[in-house]
Image (cartoon, rainbow, N blue to C red):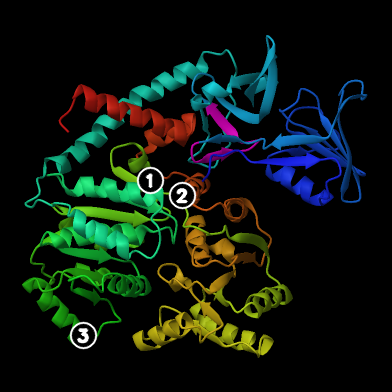
Amino acid sequence: MSTQERSINLAVGQNINYDDVIIQLHNFGYERQSEISSFGQISAVGDTIKIYCCSDPNPIAIEFWGNNIESIYSFSLAKKNKIEKYQQIHINENHLRLPGIKIKPGDFVVHEDHGIGIYKSKVKKQLAESYRQFYSIEYLNGDNLYVPESAKNKITVYQGVGRRQPRLSRLGSPVWQKTKKKVEQSIIHLARELLEVYAKRELVKKDRVIKIDKKWDKKLADTFEHIETSDQEKAIAEIYADLEKSTPMDRLLIGDVGFGKTEVAIRAATQVINNGFQVVILAPTTILSRQHYKTISKRLQDFPIKIAELSRFVSAEKQKEVEGNLSSGSIDLLVGTHRVLNTNLRFKRLGLLIIDEEQKFGVKDKEKLKKLKTDVDVLSMSATPIPRTLFISLSGIRQISVIKTPPKNRKPIVTKVEQYNDSKIIEYIRRELKRGGQVYFLHNDVKTIQAKNKKLKKLLPEARISFAHGQMSENDLATVMAGFAAGDIDILICSTIIENGLDIPQANTLIIEDADRFGLSQLYQLRGRIGRGLDQAYAYITFKKKLVGNAYKRLSALAEKTDLGSGFDIAFSDLEIRGGGNILGRQQHGNMEELGLMLYTKLLEQAVKRIKKNKDIAV
């Protein structure tokens, strides 16, 4: 997510839609009121928009004639008289931007020294003969703290791990410092426990040395059809450094769907194979496994690497052949589902295990994974990691690489949350088909999916419609998916089987029925199936009954977080909405509630660094 501040320029004589200006100011974090009284507010009465922004000590009025700006002037809030006329004004957004996070007015925030408050707005205050920018935070009893821009690193967003609203702190009270000190002592004990667990892995030594071949690396880079983003380059460098170490790698790679995680994994895999070792890429679904197999086979067609697949799309006879070739070492790279964890499978020299969306695997599969992991390098990939995985990684104990830079020309997905309506849905579908695109229609009920198929065929007789779900035979499912990928199907009515794996640039409209039945991270993953090409993508998240409570919060969060690279934020929101559960025990759960997850994690990371530096425990 960009940390660059957004702004709007308005000038006398400019032709601009009156309503568009109000919408843009609202998106900038300004609160609409009938009458403005403080910073961060706007009002729109008749042909006049009034703005109280931090770029001027007085509010601004913009008078329109239709969609043409007639005059701009500042005025006194007390006397209501005009002060100064302007030909042009420059209005900045009212959000507080921290690295990777945008905090809007009304959000709960935590100041390290003063506690939990509510972010109100940006403010300009006169000091001596100049104006300086501050961030206004409201505390208990309406007291305000003005934080200078130079000290904004002391502010974090309050990210809860439960359903209760946080209590505001009282400015000047010693309660916050006492609470923080108590939690910090508990954090030190937790940091020691976590480091002891991960220290055991640090003691394991690899029976191999991986040397990075720069010629192979250059050949891979030269054959990549896109230009690597800066985040991809950084992630590749971090993984290469891990591979060259004598201790096994355990790195989490986070990045939105379509942001290039697979390419980073391919770079790591080829280097390990070039050193004479085998690589396994493990996927949670058959479709994702097949997608990886096809993508990687095509990507490495000019390299002396033998690739095989192991999933239910592969015949029993072929599976036996793959098993034999793995044990003899004639297969370099295996792509597969949980079938890879079969106890009969033997590798000649396994060097790297790549796990895509590890949280999707069941308990039994994870137990088998542990046996594979003991002394091999492990790279886990995820778009929206589960809370515990995310937390451990953020604390600085497990290595983490993040790809937040979107591919060139990628556009944010326009997301609408609304009650299901047949006529509207038909309109959305026809709009997509008219521009030559394809549609995913998510109907996650296998019992009624064929009935939905018949209904849509009646409503849209001109469209080519088919359906797909996980209970279909391997051949039928593969045929339908291949037809959709080839463009022979206009509308695919599907279950959540599409959540991982399909990469179809022409599919740019997604309709989800009964979205309130899904988790936030799952909805985010599903939305990532579209918007893979250059065309604008549209996601329609629908529900049948009136939404209340957490269901409403989930869908609202999805509609708000449309910025490219929001997977990290979605993971946090999911944690906040669902509650932290037993992430690290009841006591630590309570401590996270006291400080907010972001500040808690920041203090844990600091504690881990101090302990490592002082060598209080063996690491």
Q: Quick one: SS at disc 1?
A: helix
SS under mark 3: helix
The location of residue 312, given as percent across then percent down, is 29, 80
Q: From the top left corner, tell me how far across and down residue 171 is, in percent.
A: 60, 16
Please, is residue 232 above or below residue 320 in the view?
A: above
Q: Is residue 114 left or right of residue 273?
A: right
Q: Depth check: give the residue in front, 279 or 283.
A: 279
User: Alpha carbon of mark 2 to alpha carbon of mark 1: how far?
Assistant: 8 Å
Q: Which residues are magenta?
A: 99-110
Whole-number angstrom distance, CA of label 2 to CA of label 3: 38 Å
- Label 3 packing within 10 angstroms: few (<14), some (14-19), many (20+): few
Tell me the residue at 34%/46% (across/down).
Answer: 234
Q: Earlier in the sequence, mark 1 or mark 3?
A: 3
Would residue 616 appear left or right of 18 to someone viewing this image? left
Residue of label 3: 316
Mark 2 neighbour class, 10 Å CA radius: few under 14, some 14 to 19, many 20 or more? some
Whether residue 213 can be seen here: yes
